[in-house]
Amino acid sequence: MAEDISRFDICPCAVTISLLDSKWKILILRELLQGPKRYGELKKGVVGVSQKMLTQSLKEMQADQLVDRKVYPEVPPHVEYSLSSLGQSLYPVAEALENWGIAFIKNSDPDYLAKRFNIHEPGKHWLRIPDRSKE
């Protein structure tokens, strides 16, 4: 099948970027790589995402077959999101992004990082590392 991709005249890198075309999708991927999560857990882990953007991103990721949504027949309804096997296959991509980011941060001037990423209040920015101590 890989030999047939040229007939579509599309770049495989562009396809991957298109499927993960927002910071929110990549951060959702990061959260779900740790295991299934309920909506509220995702909202807490994806710092700064609005309810609208989280819902929209999850729907798009479901349509792209990256995320599975399971509804448990309970009152109130219990909904859980997890990565599909296709979504789980993105683990090496996420790991490479994380490792590159670590190297970039370590080798960058702190003042440059603060200015470039507009980080004025540590811990209150979408770039921050989620607090997992309470999990």
Image (cartoon, helix red, strand yellow):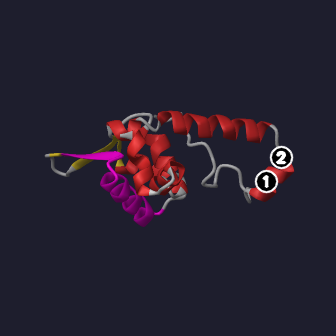
Taking the view exactly as shown, the residue that stands out farthest to the bottom is 52
Magenta segment includes 61:
yes
Q: Which residues are magenta?
A: 50-71
The residue that appears at 52% across and 33% down in the rendered structure is 92
- Looking at the image, which is closer to me, 35 or 13? 13
The quadrant of the picture occupied by the N terminus is top left
User: Is residue 58 rendered magenta in the image?
Assistant: yes
Instruction: Reply above or below: 129 against 95.
Output: below
For the residues labelled 1 and 2, the Cα–Cα distance comes to 6 Å
Give coordinates of residue 127: x percent, y percent: 63, 51
Q: Is residue 37 above or below residue 10?
A: above
Q: Is residue 120 visible?
A: no
Q: Label 2 near label 1: C-beta < 8 Å?
A: yes
Q: Which mark is residue 89?
A: none
Label 2 element class? helix
* Place of residue 99 in the rendered image (x, y in percent of width and height, measured from the top left): 65, 34
Horizontally, residue 82 falls left or right of residue 92, namely left
- Residue sitting at 79 percent across and 54 percent down? 114
Q: Is residue 84 visible?
A: yes
Looking at the picture, does residue 3 appear above or below residue 52? above
Say which of 110 and 76 sits in front: 110
Residue visible at 44% across and 63% down in the picture: 53
Tell me the residue that label 1 is attached to.
Answer: 114
The residue to which callout 2 is attached is 110
Q: Amino acid at mark 2?
A: Pro
* Location of residue 83 by image quarter: top left
